Image (cartoon, grey):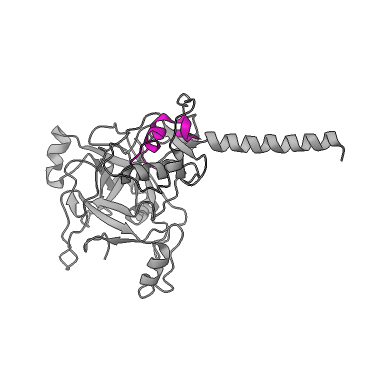
């Protein structure tokens, strides 16, 4: 190979590598706070740089930094981590001194030139998601076995399902993901999808107390919607209940209010129970498992601990053959005796 050819080859490799780096550093992202952004160097994101530059960090700030880095495949130990930079960010006050060997120490320092916020370009999947989602007051903590009278979980949807005229209506809980679609469990709706019984589903958004539903629809924030399409996971198994997830398209879009908001669906975020050990479940489900099947008329919230797959598998071996979990499954355990299944 001639020297000129070798030089061209090396230059080509460098250009390809540079192209990959640029794509990775500027790709679209959605961190756990729900604000769309782009992956940029931390110094180019004033909101995140301001957090990392503080001498003390509270746990919420550490979780924020981990979240925005993970959305861009970076770690706190990286020399120059990329972060998912939103258009705006709320910087919480600090009350606790960070450990001397904090993972974020090397990020602190004078900021370099700040880049202007980048407008997220359109994409088919991302265009289906709302620009803003999951808006809650800063510092909200999960309190297990409580009610949601303050509408902290404004994306909860009450599903009333009547499979036949001769049977009482059953209930399920859904989650608003955009102005048209509700996410729910496939076991709630798969029979209706097969029967094309879309009119059997009523969905109520902005609801807290079922006993006040009529008043809420007439004078309050509640809205009612019906289904025009149901899409269940193509690999849903009614016997093993694997891939138990479905989407319902509403007959009419809903408007966002203080009582009705879509949840965040970060597309490039892989859940890690080590970073976020607590999850929540909400709905109008069974509150007693003593045989009385008492159902709650108000929206309730239950805090759950996420269990690592290896520990969960050991505990499940006595109940499930093999005790193995699928990669798409999440194992949780209730706090203080509360749970969502029995």
**Residue at the farthest right position:** 2
Between 2 and 174, which is closer to the camera in this rendering?
2
Q: Is residue 158 above or below residue 291?
A: above
Q: Position of residue 79 (x, y in %)?
A: 52, 42
**Residue at the farthest front position:** 100
Residue lying at 20% horizontally and 37% vertically, measured from the top left: 222
Q: Position of residue 173 (x, y in %)?
A: 27, 50
Between 200 and 36, which is closer to the camera in this rendering?
36
Q: Position of residue 13 (x, y in %)?
A: 71, 38
Question: Is residue 231 located in the magenta-colored stretch of the structure?
Answer: no
Locate the C terminus by quadrant: bottom left
In the image, taking residue 23 as reference, residue 320 lies left or right, namely: left
Q: Is residue 274 above or below residue 206?
A: below
Residue lying at 87% horizontally and 37% vertically, measured from the top left: 2
Between 56 and 173, which is closer to the camera in this rendering?
56
Q: Is residue 116 visible?
A: yes
Q: Is residue 36 visible?
A: no
Numbered-mark total: 0
Q: Position of residue 207 (x, y in %)?
A: 20, 42
Q: Which residues are magenta?
A: 32-56
Residue lying at 47% horizontally and 57% vertically, measured from the top left: 235
Question: Is residue 41 located in the magenta-colored stretch of the structure?
Answer: yes
Locate the N terminus by quadrant: top right
**Residue at the farthest bottom position:** 318
Q: Quadrant of residue 257?
A: top left
Residue lying at 81% horizontally and 38% vertically, measured from the top left: 6
Q: Quadrant of residue 23?
A: top right
Between 36 and 96, which is closer to the camera in this rendering?
96
Q: Is residue 30 above or below residue 311?
A: above
């Amino acid at each position: 190979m001639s020297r000129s050819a070798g030089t061209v080859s090396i230059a080509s490799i460098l250009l390809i590598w540079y192209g990959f780096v640029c794509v990775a550093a500027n790709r679209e992202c959605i961190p756990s706070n729900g604000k769309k952004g782009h992956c940029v160097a931390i110094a180019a994101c004033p909101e995140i740089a301001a957090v990392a530059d503080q001498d003390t960090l509270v746990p919420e700030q550490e979780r924020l930094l981990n979240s925005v880095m993970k959305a861009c495949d970076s770690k706190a130990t990286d020399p120059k981590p990329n972060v998912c930079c939103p258009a705006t960010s709320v910087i919480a006050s600090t009350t606790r001194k960070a450990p001397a060997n904090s993972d974020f120490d090397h990020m602190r320092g004078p900021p370099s030139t700040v880049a202007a916020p980048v407008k997220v370009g359109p994409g088919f999947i991302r265009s289906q998601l709302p620009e803003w989602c999951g808006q809650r007051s800063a510092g909200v903590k999960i309190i297990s076995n409580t009610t949601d009278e303050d509408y902290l979980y404004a994306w909860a949807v009450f599903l009333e399902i009547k499979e036949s005229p001769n049977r009482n209506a059953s209930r399920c809980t859904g989650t608003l993901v955009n102005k048209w679609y509700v996410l729910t469990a496939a076991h709630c709706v798969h029979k209706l999808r097969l029967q094309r019984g879309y009119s059997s589903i009523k969905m109520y958004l902005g609801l807290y107390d079922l006993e006040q539903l009529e008043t809420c629809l007439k004078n309050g924030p509640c809205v009612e919607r019906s289904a025009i399409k149901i899409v269940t996971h193509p690999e849903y198994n009614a016997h093993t209940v694997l891939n138990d997830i479905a989407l319902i398209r509403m007959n009419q879009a809903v408007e966002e209010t203080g009582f009705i908001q879509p949840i965040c669906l970060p597309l490039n975020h892989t859940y890690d129970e080590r970073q976020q050990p607590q999850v929540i479940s909400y709905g109008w489900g069974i509150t007693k498992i003593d045989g009385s099947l008492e159902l709650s008329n108000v929206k309730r919230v239950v805090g759950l601990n996420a269990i690592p797959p290896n520990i969960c598998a050991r505990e499940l071996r006595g109940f499930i053959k093999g005790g193995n979990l699928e990669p798409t499954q999440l194992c949780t355990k209730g706090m203080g005796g509360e749970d969502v299944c029995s």
